[in-house]
Amino acid sequence: MNIIRLQGNIEKKNGIYYEYDSDLKPLGEGGMGQVYKGYKIVERTGEKTPVAIKAAYDGIPEKIVERARREASIQLDHENLVRMYGFVETVGFDAAGNKKVRYYMIMELLIGVTLEDLMFGVVTDQYGNQIPFASELYNQYQQDRNSAVVRIMKAILSGLMALHDKGYIHRDVDPSNVMITTDEKIKLIDFGICKKVVSLESKDRSLTSSGEFIGKVNYAAPELVLGDVRSQDYTTDIYSLGILLYQLCTGHLPFKGTDQEILASNLHKALPLSDVKELALKKIIRKATEKSQSKRYATISEMRVDIEKVVSNRNNNILQNKKIRMMAAGVIFAVVIVISVISLSKDNSEEEVIVTQPVEEEIVDTVPEPFIEVIKQPTIQEVYSEAMILLSYDDSINMQERGKEKLRILVEDSLFVPAKMTYFLLLLNSDDSSEVRKGYYGLEKIAQEDTLNSQAMYECGLTLSKSNMFFDEPSIRQSLIKIEPDIHKANEWLYKSIELDTFDYKSVYWAFNNLMEMKLSNSFPSNGDKQIIELYDMFNHRIDYYEDSISGIYEMAIMKDAETLKIWGLIK
């Protein structure tokens, strides 16, 4: 037994650590390292949570380390996404006294099979243990394929929507990155080549180079095929979803050949949709896999709405067919009664004939179960999808207000965090003082309760910061909320956001801006100069991942401050 204990600064702050036995057989092995079963342990209580710990190989390239660090930073708690816990870097020495740095990525421990395995009929894990949920899904896939396909796609769409809501695109959606687990979950995994989308001009220059292909050839959108980093956005994932939906419907991929031939097909050829039998699904696949990004679904919400309609329309068709059969049976029954009455009249012309009509309640009792499903209340996710679609109509105030109202109802009647974040951000950026106040205090509550919500922390920090000649957003919010700047409290929030999101340059800038204000107003901490330089260097490192108009303004702002830093002798 050789227990390895892992604890970085964030773990110390949160009172937890991770451990695993390096003498045990790894759960798996990949290009980056070996994966072990380990535990997350709460120091105060000793509570243990099973986790997967990926121990990186010695000497892996820095680019891979940065990619793993970024993957670990995408920490979303959603039932259809694998949960990432953290990235720990340890420093030790080998037998010769040489310094040795080791890297570990910690994530949720998932036991199950991939969707790729499931499509081939594999319903057992690597040790031969059956996964009951996988068996159930596979049986449904064999007997009622369309229902199984919609069930699987809804879960994947739900997870991807949460990822998009946080500003990331996955870029590697395919069956091997979807897990069917023992706890009856369908989860999207592997955030290794996720990209933060700040705007359509954003660019991960150090991790993804222009002209470089990443992802899987069979599921690659044209902009991925071309290595066009600038054009990669939410529709890039939607194209991959379209290919995946085609594969689920037909049991095979749309294009065959060498990798280069498949890439060329994704770039130029339309999918052979004749193999897709369900018309509604065929239309969804066609729209999702348009070569032009502007013609695809703009958001996951839009695609989910159409997927939902497949089920709804199918239930309606079932209901309609049963109603027709019932009506036909009723007509036949009525004809039989009429014939019987006529017959009786002829045979017993002097006798009184009493005809009993069918009782309405008997027909009502035969209303099929699907009818009950059709009229049920929409789910939280469905309402949220509708709200997001309404909010996407930038040129319609009426549609925007309707979307906002749907979000308000969700926030008041549920604990659905994406709805709360979207709603409170809308309020915070409005022109109405009562709405701005409600938005700020709503986000503050989220930031206090959710220790991983870096976006809420950033917005709270920004609201309390000091405005400058480049940005007046803080002072506008403060005047509407009727509060004063509190740059010390602002930096408490901003430093938390900086730790959680290692690619967030805005939090770094505003923390830097506030320290500059402290120095100018003589309320400077003793190590303030050092903090200023650290933040200045950190900003210049993080901003290098972006190349868009907004980041350009931030660069101009810090270049202006750099002149002051030179005067103070803090930089050359």
Image (spheres, helix red, strand yellow):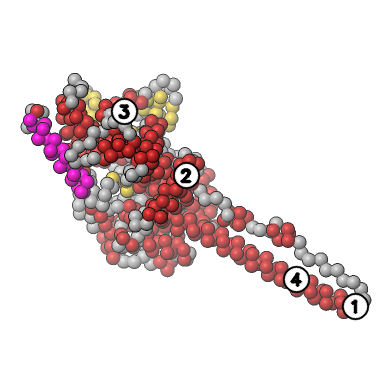
Q: Please name the amino acid that badge 4 sits on.
A: Ala
Magenta segment: 546-567
Residue at the spot of label 1: 349
Q: Kindly state the secondary structure of the residue where label 1 is placed.
A: loop
Q: Residue at x 31, y 54 (%)?
A: 236
Q: Is residue 215 left or right of residue 318?
A: left
Q: Is residue 191 visible?
A: no
Q: Is residue 329 left or right of residue 84?
A: right
Q: How packed is label 4: few (under 14 Cα within 10 Å), some, or many (20 or more)? A: some
Front label number (4 vs 1): 1
Q: CA distance from mark 3 to mark 2?
A: 33 Å
Residue at the spot of label 4: 334
Q: Quadrant of the N terminus?
A: top left
Find out whether the residues at labels 2 and 1 contact each other: C-beta distance under 8 Å. Answer: no
Q: Residue at x 28, y 65 (%)?
A: 268
Of the numbered discs 3 and 2, the one sitting upstream in the chain is 3
Q: Please name the amino acid that badge 1 sits on.
A: Ser
Q: Please name the amino acid that badge 2 sits on.
A: Leu
Of the numbered discs 2 and 1, the one sitting upstream in the chain is 1
Find out whether the residues at labels 3 and 2 contact each other: C-beta distance under 8 Å. Answer: no
